[in-house]
Image (tube, rainbow, N blue to C red):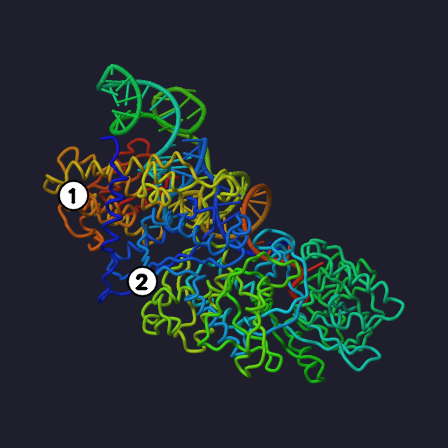
Amino acid sequence: MSSYDFKEIEKKWRKVWEEKPVNADGAGKPKFYCLDMFPYPSGKGLHVGHWRGYVLSDVLSRYKILQGYHVLHPMGWDAFGLPAENFAIKNGVHPSDGVKANVANIKRQLKEISAVYDWSREINTTDPAYYKWTQWIFVQMFKKGLAYEKEMPLNWCPRCKAVLANEEAAGGVCERCGEPVTKKMLRQWMLKITAYADRLLEDLNTLDWPEKVVKMQTEWIGKSFGAEIDFKLDGRDDALKVFTTRPDTLYGATFMVISPEHSLARELTVEENKAEMEEYIRKAGAKSSVARMADKDKTGVFTGSYGINPLNGEKLQVWVSDYVLADYGTGAIMCVPAHDDRDFDFATAFGLPIVEVISKDGTTHSKLEKAYTGEGTLVNSGRFDGMGSDEAIDGITDFLAQNGTGKKTVNYKLRDWVFSRQRYWGEPIPIVHCEKCGAVAVPEDQLPVELPNVASYQPTSTGESPLAGITEWVNTVCPQCGGPAKRETNTMPQWAGSSWYFLRYPDPNNDKVLADPELLKKWLPVDYYVGGVEHAVLHLLYARFYTKFLHDIGVVDFEEPFTKLFNQGMITNMGRKMDKSGGNGVSPDDIVNSYGCDTLRIYELFIGPPELDSEWDERSIEGVSRFLNKVWRLVDANAQNPAKVSKEIERLRHKLIHDVTTRLNNWSLNTVVSAFMEYTNKITEQAGKAGIDKETLETITILLAPFAPHVAEEFWEKLGHSDSVFSQTWPKADPEKMKDDTITIVVQIGGKLRDTIILSREATKEEAIAAAKVALGARLSGEIVKEIYVPGRIVNFVVK
RNA sequence: GCCCGAAUGGUGUAAUGGUAGACACAAAGGACUUAAAAUCCUUCGGCUUUGGCCGUACCGGUUCGAGUCCGGUUUCGGGCACCA
């Protein structure tokens, strides 16, 4: 036989599993919640790179089932948001129809993987019965004051015609399309994620997550300690407030800079500088974020006003420059050119004084070539001279506090979350605007606020939602006073539905509560979460925020949703990330058709370490296919008349169990496959001599089940069983039975390999050394300084 | 600029500080076959006087022994970046 009939077998077992799920009985078992990041049902379908994560989580799920766990392994659709809307616009269909078609296609593809997904728990974020609860959470946040409206300059993507959250505009380009982001003033709904900044930061310690992701979230939250200092404005009653992390450098402040968006920028500008200032502020506003960031050359305009250093009373020029960010700290800084690179550049460009106040070694320098940004000893700092930076930070801050001109403070890079989108395809924000009562939440018994059907759902270029055009939907009554009112026409961002979906799977059809508290208690938190690293600060930060909020209002009893996170590596093709639109996507459909699901599953593991990127190589699949066929022939030839167990095969069996189990536990899945190949090759060789026993065949079958579930079930049946292989228990290796009768010992001189000797397992150190000397004979000359013996491995002679 | 990965045969890669290249792919040769497919066997880092010598990006160090640990350098990939 050339090859087993994988099409027949895979079809057969899929049908059996559908009728009798292998994971149905959970009575008395510990739980294991294994979750994939649910996919966006894009029109492009899945490629083999998507398969990787799904195969990894399924191998783990099936392994846990065999270890006696009741496993929750669900799947659903994150279907609101821009891509679905853009797909619909491009193809001239309604977004809901586009989503329906894409879901059907991807679901078909996902079924090809034969994962143990419980499709009875399938969820879809665009289902009103689901987004009822997305809206409900928003209402709870609104009631707690965490959702608020604000007119503010927002990240605006001219191509998507959409407002973007800071997370979506990272690097100054649109997260979706790469277009440079500009600013636009609009009224927006905001979520006060900053209220949770400290908890989001601190609880990162409790998570078993990749270090990289923890670091990225830490940097995104960006907590820094420092001081807020008031610089009285010369000739005015008010003061300019600045934030600094280095109050120890206060004596070195030689000028000040405020951002072009600062509320005092115009006010402080003296008459003769006004024209130039207006022009500068206008230009800064028009510059895209990218341009503003990319251009490191310092520009600026002097206001003509002065601030007064609270420590030494010196008058400092106040400038306006776009290198100061409006929304970090106070939007104003004190400038210490001697000890800050940017201030140094600015001072150099405009000929402003540079005064050294921190010295590495206590000596002063007449001229600095560049800023010294490290800590050191204070100089030119009056009575603080000679203090170390740390001491001076406290000393100067305390002094300012006593004078009422400064205080210790903490700053975060994290901003509140811009939560509204002026697009059609999202959850309507459940708010009604009443002239008398203001913004009023839609009562919970009126949720969901369903997304109305609309003829034209294309984005408007004015920045208004297409929903604003449906007057019969917009006009409503105020739930509070009964007077005329208008519905909020903005919708929620794509992340809204995905920020809590993992809570819904345990109880996907509940229409009374978000999910039954008992079921939440049983399944959550998620034990193992598998997905791409691209969500490090978007979805994963939002989901943690939502979970903490729901904890605070008593919906869940835990603070962190995902105990363990695993980021699978990308699959690249021709060195680039696999992408259908990039022309290098490989469809799993074709591979499944020509090699079968089991082969592709194993190849996805064999391709490389799961956490690293791996290059797709179609030809290498052949090796996996040969391996499965070889095992097939072994089982097929011996299932009917197994032989009596041989010592050698028993030994190989235990080694196989040991290697597969330890490597699986280390998540070294590529080497699990190697171990399988290595030992089944050896076992097949032995079986060719004297046959193979039934227990070994059964062991191979159970071990293989998480990886190649169809052939494993088929083997199990061939071996005379009528139940599922997944009702079996994962085998245990017996260390005693793994041991060989003989050991091979490497003989070295000075650490270099000279010979190998074979000894009995019980050989002593003396016997090993003696045997090594015999083996070396005349090659061992000179005085032996040292004899090193590593039991069972090495004899090494150090000679002079 | 800062942070984090990575660098091993023609290719993907493997090696608790202990025989570098397991397991595969590709290639070459052979067996079986009328033939092909499938399968099986052999070779497969370099040099070589066939005894060995060299070899894990580069330079040094620790060690009886280093792909692995330490210090420095280079290249590639990723993330962050005017955050005061």
How far across and how far down the image is residue A631, in percent? 23, 39
For the question of whether residue A783 can be seen, the reply is no
Q: Tell me which chain the residue with mark 2 is part of.
A: A
**Mark 1 near mark 2, Cβ–Cβ under 8 Å?**
no
How far across and how far down the image is residue A386, in percent? 70, 72
List the single residue furthest toward the front.
Answer: A472
How far across and how far down the image is residue A729, in percent? 20, 55
Residue appearing at x 38%, y 47% in the figure: A109
Relative to A277, is A570 on the left or the right? left
How far across and how far down the image is residue A138, in percent? 50, 72
Check the image and report above or below for A121 versus A382. above
Q: Amino acid at mark 2?
A: Phe
Pick the quarter of the image with the C terminus of chain A: top left
- For disc 1, the marked residue is A718
Relative to A25, is A230 on the left or the right? right
Q: Amino acid at mark 1?
A: Lys
Q: Quadrant of residue A431?
A: bottom right
Q: Earlier in the sequence, mark 1 or mark 2?
A: 2
**Distance between mark 1 and mark 2 Cα atoms:** 30 Å
Residue appearing at x 69%, y 69% in the figure: A377
Check the image and report above or below for A522 versus A634. below
- For disc 2, the marked residue is A32
